[in-house]
Image (cartoon, rainbow, N blue to C red):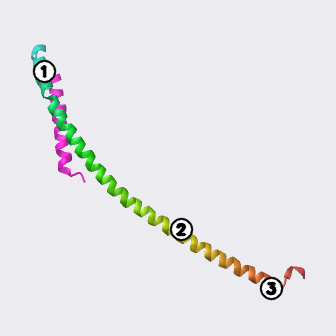
Amino acid sequence: MTSSRDKFWSGVLLGATAGAIAALLTAPRRGKETRVVLQQSLEHLPEVTAEVAEKVQEQAERLGVVAGDRWGTVRGRLQQAWRSGVAAAKQEWQTTTIAAESVSERESSSPDQSAS
């Protein structure tokens, strides 16, 4: 299960990256200075990207495990509900069949009152 701490640090990392990019683009520097800073930032981009990708992969793996566990639980509940529904339907069928047979027997054993 993904912990709140992992979510927090992933958010911090992504927020810091987005903030750094926004700061560079809005900084009041001359063009050449901004290009130098951007170049330096771009040199670190593969490292930051690798860290973010690693965190995303870890989160995806955890999510897969959690989803698998939850699917197993849901699947078990659905199977139990299905079995209960089938059992209830069989019980209802038997009750209805017995009642219908009883009515049929009473009708066939009693004299026909519609002939009078």
- Residue 42 position, x and y percent, is 15, 24
Look at the picture and state if 54 lies above or below 26. Answer: below
Horizontal arrangement in the rendering, residue 50 relative to residue 80 (left or right) = left
Look at the picture and state if 24 lies above or below 90. Answer: above
Q: Which residue is mark 1?
A: 39
Horizontal arrangement in the rendering, residue 39 relative to residue 64 (left or right) = left
Q: Nearer the viewer, mark 2 or mark 3?
A: 2
Which one is nearer the viewer's eye here, 43 or 13? 43
Taking the spot 17% from the left edge, 22% from the top edge, the residue there is 25
Q: Which residue is mark 3?
A: 110
Res. 115 image quadrant = bottom right
Look at the picture and state if 101 lies above or below 48. Answer: below
Q: Decide whether the magenta segment is chiefly helix, strand or loop.
A: helix
| Mark 1 and mark 3: Cα distance apart in space | 102 Å
Q: Which residue is mark 2?
A: 86
Q: Determine which of the numbered discs, if any, sits on residue 16 in the image.
A: none
- Residue 65 position, x and y percent, is 29, 53
Q: Residues within 10 Å of mark 3 (few under 14, many from 20)?
A: few
Q: Which residues are magenta?
A: 1-27
Taking the spot 86% from the left edge, 79% from the top edge, the residue there is 114
